[in-house]
Image: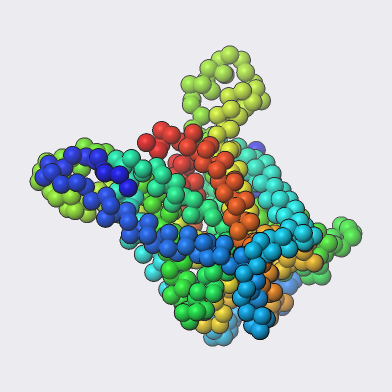
Amino acid sequence: MTLLTYVMAVVYFYPVLWMLMTGFKSEGDAVKMPPSLLFSPTMENYRLIWDSGVAAFFGNSVIVTLTSTLFALLLGVPAAYGLAMFKLKRSEDVLFWFMSTKFLPVAGIIIPLYMLLKEIRLLDNLWALFFLYTAMNVPLVVWMMRSFFKEVPLEVMESARVDGASDTRTFFQITLPLVRPGLISTALLSFIFAWNEFFLAVSLTATNAATMPVHMASFMTQQGLFWAKMSSVASIAVVPALLLGWFTQKQLVRGMTMGAVKG
Amino acid sequence: MHKPTGIPDKKGFAPPVRRLLWPSIIFVALITQIPFLVTIYYSLHDWNLMRPDKGITFSGIRNYSKILSDAAFYEVLGNTFLLTGGALIVCLVVGLVFSLLMNRDFFGKGIVRTMLVSPFFIMPAVAGIVWKTMLLNPSFGLTAYFASLFHFPLIDWLASYPLMTIVLMVAWQWIPFFMLILLAGLQSVPDDVMEAAHLDGANALQRFQHVILPHLLKYIEVAVLLGLIFIMQTFGEIYVTTAGGPGYASTNLPYFVYRVGFQGWDVGGASAVGVIIVLMTIVLMTALFKFLRKTFQGELT
């Protein structure tokens, strides 16, 4: 049984592993069949593709992902706190409304977004992606953080209040530190979703504001036969989300099910 | 918004719920909801960016009747259904197998788990490209290598079976999601119930069928309904592998919007397809919400 599990895991993971390794091979080694595990690793591909402009697209991805994650937290955490701590008659409606915006297909709004951005000259501009990714991640933040805030025992906060701490102080000094692990995994998941987003990016950006996935798609049409170079670009595109994903895999279920399944 | 009735504040002023909520609600509504109203507006107009001479004219429901009488639309609708349904079935079966395998203690469990969740974090654009060029390339790919090794006929998967291949690709990415949800379900089976079944002499299969499966049903439903909504929106894998072709053979609804809008520059037509997708999603979501509200009532109040 365990052996079977190992075999399945290796087969299933193989495409990722192969891609990560091929990035370090010479073009000649890269196309050898069967793919060799033993080869003399080279950084040549990375040097070449980094100099050929990948750096700019990587930068775009980093900027837009970090800023949109930060702003999604700034907007979403207070809302989550409000929904978790205070009884509102319609809090359930508000929550489901947030969830519904996350489920609505982007295809339903892409045309007006394009026309509007064209009108205000923000096509192919990072600001556009920043606003969209922030809006995309706010519902995720609200749902996840709400479920973390709800786990904070009320007595802790009440005793702080009895001690004379203001609401704001209670929040920053007591509540926030208690939910920090949850806050971190929420931030990581927002980061991953924004980092991997493709539909909006490919529809609304071109040469200036393109992010890594968009660059990846155009890189392939030009140089799809150079496996080693392609794999090194792909690795750069994938590794940030993959690493963060590994750290946050335990919270993935909670994030994807909007806190419904704890995981 | 109703008057908040929260934790009584000893200083006697109402908790600042509104101030906490409104910024995010306004921001999200402005960016995700208002544009949809514009989509509806556009969908009622004849407007093609390739024909600026024709301008923008009100056309009523003509865009809708044009789409609904177009054979391509029904092919796309069928593709969307097959892609989503096919991927869901594969995800559910393989996800269940993986979760059962992972619901045990063995050496290296952490690493195996990490390997199994990894495809979920690979961006669709890269997943599609790696599959297309390295695994499935008809002359140099891994499948071609195995075909020649065992003297199987050489198959250009993406050209001959585009939709089926994309189903497998999408399933590869979404299996971890199913595995993790089902694993959460398996781990929450109460120990005493399992023990009782054991004492009653139920064998492993009976325990699975009568104890685990009923408990798991709730989790299966969550996974399927969420998977349904997310997999319906598949786009990147199609964009980088087949570009929806040959013909419309691997175009799904979101990719159809892209083709009509950004290749045909038919603003009205693409908007109408967008409206149709949203309506379909709303129907699905209504079912989902009914279910989620029922299942997670305790969690929600």
Q: Residue at the spot x=53%, y=53% of the render?
A: A103
Tell me if B85 is positioned left or right of B31 in this view. right
Residue A232 can be seen in this image: no
Above or below, A99 against B208 in this view is below
Residue B238: percent from left, percent from top: 68, 64
Tell me if B98 is positioned left or right of A59 in this view. right
Residue A34: percent from left, percent from top: 75, 65
- The answer to which of A94 and A236 lies nearer the viewer is A94
Above or below, A156 against B114 in this view is above
Residue A36: percent from left, percent from top: 70, 66
Residue A206 can be seen in this image: yes
- The answer to which of A94 and A183 lies nearer the viewer is A94
Residue A101: percent from left, percent from top: 48, 54
- The answer to which of B272 and B264 lies nearer the viewer is B272
Tell me if B164 is positioned left or right of B95 in this view. right
**Residue B262 occupies quadrant:** bottom right
Position of the C terminus of chain B by quadrant? top left
Q: Residue at the spot x=45%, y=64% of the render?
A: B31
Q: Residue at the spot x=48%, y=21% of the render?
A: B192
In the displayed image of the protein, which residue is found farthest to the top?
B200
**Residue A50 occupies quadrant:** bottom right
Q: Residue at the spot x=62%, y=69% of the render?
A: B58
